[in-house]
Amino acid sequence: MNFPLDTDTVSHGIQLAVAPVFLLTAVSGMIGVVASRLARIIDRARLVEERMKKGPSVDEHAADQIELGELRTRGLLANGSIGLLTLCAFLIGATIVVLFLGETIELKMLRLPMITFLAGVVCFMLALACFMAETMIATRLLNFGKHRR
């Protein structure tokens, strides 16, 4: 294995590896947004559970059970989104490492950066789909004065 550590090679390796870092920035922002939504889901579920313990009427109890089920679904979607975003960040990090090593020490792993990058992008897209589904459920809960169907 050859280790050409001249300044030009290292700087080119850094330039090549920096491009996926911008995706990491988007991923970290998304994790923050989804984690905030998950915290609000948990807070709302605790409030509904406390209300149920105080012994509401039968009608209110049924409505609370339905809401808790929807909150559970939203929580699972948010957790799934966070898991996918974390996996995405790991895969993008692996892409950066492989690109940098490939450039600086001439490590021949031609397909690995392509696979890790594309897998990271797929994870990001799936996380966005979970986020969209969670948001749609949350918006549906806000029936804006109309009855649910």
Image (cartoon, helix red, strand yellow):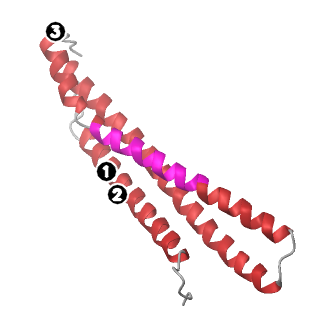
Q: Assess whether residue 67 is covered by the magenta stretch.
A: no
Q: Mark 3 or mark 1, which is nearer the start of the sequence?
A: 3
Q: Which residue is mark 3?
A: 6
In the image, what residue type sits under mark 1? Val
Q: Which residues are magenta?
A: 22-39
Identity of the residue furthest to the front in this view: 145
Q: Residue at x 47, y 55 (%)?
A: 81
Q: Measure how far apart labels 1 and 3 are at the Cα level.
A: 32 Å
Closer to us: 91 or 109: 91
Determine whether the residue tagged by mark 2 lies in a helix, strand or loop.
helix
Residue type for callout 3: Asp
User: Are discs 2 and 1 less than 8 Å apart at CB?
Assistant: yes
Image position of 49 (left or right of 104): right
Q: What mark, if any, has residue 121 been given in the picture?
A: 1
Q: Which mark is residue 125?
A: 2
Give the x, y percent position of residue 110.
20, 37
> Mark 2 Cα within 10 Å, few/some/many (few <14, many 20+)?
some
User: What amino acid does circle 2 point to?
Assistant: Met
Q: Residue at image x 29%, y 35%?
A: 21
Viewer-nearest residue: 121 or 82: 82
> Looking at the image, is mark 2 or mark 3 nearer the viewer?
2
